Structure formats: C-alpha cells, structure tokens
C-alpha cells in the first residue's frame, strides 16, 4: 500500500489539465475566428457580400455571443457546470449538424 501511495505522489496532474485544456481549445475550433476565417472567401462568393459585410456579421455574432454569456453564467450558477456543459454541448452539436446542410 505504501508503494502505491509513493507512485501517486510523483504523478503530476498538471499534464492531465494541459491535455484536457488542449482538447477544449481543439473542439471549440468551429466557433473560433481561426476556423471561420478559412471560409470568408466562400461567404463572399456564395452570398455576394463584401468582406466588410462578412466581418460585420461575424462581429455582431461575436457581440451577441458575449452578451449571452451573462445568461449562461447565471444558468451555470443555478444548475451547475456539468449540466450546462451537457446542454451547451448538445446544442452546439445540433448547430454544427444543421450547418453541415447549409
């Protein structure tokens, strides 16, 4: 039993946190600027918008998402982070699935 405890004393949990954080950044990619920027030329051709209009729509969407974080924060305080992660993850996957048809 003492030998097992010494093994766990040497294990650095920071690597687990680093891996989980990296996965979080990776899986949030579809909603981030670095992935949306790949499609700006496609948006311009498909919708006939200027680069300014595409950027304006993205800026407005980012502002709305930021303001919605106030409401999401209240829900997290009320229902807990686990429940809200499941709900938000499910809604995000539905949105990605819907966007694949557009």
Image (tube, rainbow, N blue to C red):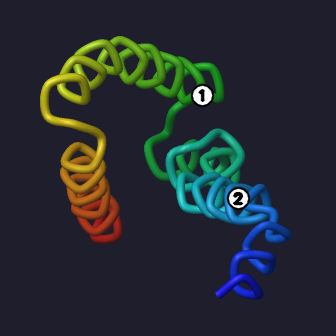
Regarding mark 2 in the picture, which secondary structure is present there?
Answer: helix
Q: Which residue is mark 1?
A: 50
Residue 80 disc label: none
Q: Given this view, does label 2 or label 1 mark the residue nearer the observer?
A: 2
Residue at figure coordinates x 31%, y 13% from the top left: 70
Q: Nearer the viewer, residue 88 or 29?
A: 88
| Left or right placement of residue 83 versus residue 25 in this view | left
Task: Please state the total of marks drawn on the protein image.
Answer: 2
Quadrant of the frame with the C terminus: bottom left
Kind of element beneath mark 1: loop
Left or right: 25, with 13 as reference point: left
Outermost left residue: 79
The Cα–Cα distance between marks 2 and 1, rounded to whole angstroms, is: 34 Å
Give the x, y percent position of residue 54.
54, 29
Binning the other alpha carbons within 10 Å of mark 1 as few (below 14), some (14 to 19) or many (20 upward) gives some
Q: Which residue is mark 2?
A: 22
- Residue sitting farthest toward the right: 10
- Of residue 45 and residue 71, the one placed in the foreground of this image is 71
Point out the tag, 2 or 1, that comes first from the N-terminus. Answer: 2
Foreground: 43 or 87? 87
- In the rendered view, would you say 55 is above or below 3? above
Q: Is residue 64 left or right of residue 52?
A: left
């Amino acid at each position: 039993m003492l030998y097992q405890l010494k093994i766990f004393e040497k294990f650095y949990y920071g690597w687990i946190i680093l891996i989980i954080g990296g996965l979080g950044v990776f899986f949030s990619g579809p909603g981030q600027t670095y992935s949306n920027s790949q499609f700006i030329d496609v948006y311009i051709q498909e919708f006939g918008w200027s680069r300014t209009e595409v950027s304006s729509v993205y800026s407005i969407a980012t502002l709305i998402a930021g303001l919605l974080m106030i409401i999401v924060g209240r829900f997290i305080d009320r229902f807990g982070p686990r429940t809200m992660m499941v709900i938000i993850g499910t809604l995000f996957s539905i949105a990605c699935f819907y966007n694949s048809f557009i």
